Image: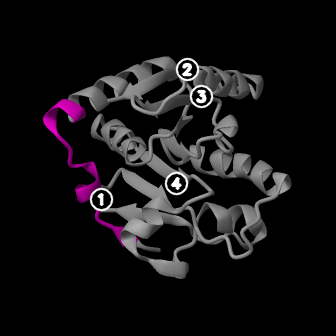
Amino acid sequence: MYSVNVDKLVKTSETHTESLLEITDNIIEGLGNHKAFAVLGGKVDTFKIAYNIMEKGNKVLFVDGDIRTDVFLGKYKLGKSAKGVLDYIKRPEKNEEIVCVTNHKNLSLIFTGINEDGVVTDDEIMIFKSLIDKYSKEYDYIVVDSDEDGTLAAFCGYAAIIAEKETYDEDELNNRVIQLEDKECNVLGVIIRE
């Protein structure tokens, strides 16, 4: 099991911090008693939301569920030795230890992992639900950073979308909301990042 220091990831400007705290409060309120949610397009901001939830006294698991890129694994340069989401969904019977502890007692994370063959089947994606179920017993909240298409978001039940002000397309965002809601994933809101 790896232990990683996440303090550099959560540093940001005061204005950005205040915005993310407000977003965090709105997400928690929107979830009610639900434990798991995904953020599409959030990347590091998704992690900062997870951190904010932990700062409010909760035990939080952050999952790098963007199975197309390994944003967080790349930041820590752990190479192919760090197991993660992809290892779990490709070989759930191995029951490998995929949770990494952080320098904050109530914040853990799961990296994307390594996809040796570059392929993720629909059956493998379905296994992600069992990962959420498995860890929801141990954590107050599970925060998933999903890919732009929301591949794993549907298994969380709730999602928020973060889009860049300069590049977002309203019709595309509306379509993404409809697609998520068709998969029974409630969209808590769309955040336009300036």
Q: Is residue 32 visible?
A: no
Task: Give neighbour class at mark 1: few <14, some 14-19, many 20+ (Cα, 10 Å).
Answer: some
How far apart are the alpha carbons under marks 1 and 3? 25 Å
Q: Answer with left or right where residue 147 lies relative to residue 104.
A: right
Per the rendering, the mark at residue 114 is: none
Give the residue drawn at x 27%, y 27%: 19
Q: Answer with left or right where residue 18 lies relative to residue 115.
A: left
How far apart are the alpha carbons under marks 4 and 3? 16 Å
**Which amino acid, by three-letter code, is at mark 3?**
Tyr
How far apart are the alpha carbons under marks 1 and 4? 14 Å
Quarter of image, res 16:
top left
Q: Quadrant of the C terminus?
A: top left
Q: Which residues are magenta?
A: 3-16
Q: Which residue is nearer to you in this view: 82 or 44?
A: 44
Going from N to C along the chain, the mark reached first, 2 or 1, is: 1
Going from N to C along the chain, the mark reached first, 4 or 3, is: 4
Give the residue drawn at x 69%, y 28%: 180
> Residue under circle 2?
170
Instruction: Please name which of the two marks, 3 or 2, marks the residue nearer to the observer.
Output: 2
How far apart are the alpha carbons under marks 3 and 2? 20 Å
> Residue under circle 4?
64
Going from N to C along the chain, the mark reached first, 3 or 2, is: 3
C-beta proximity under 8 Å, tags 2 and 1: no
Q: Position of residue 114 (x, y in %)?
A: 61, 72
Q: Answer with left or right where residue 109 lies relative to residue 15.
A: right
> Residue under circle 3?
158
> Residue under circle 1?
6
Give the residue drawn at x 16%, y 40%: 13
How far apart are the alpha carbons under marks 2 and 1? 34 Å
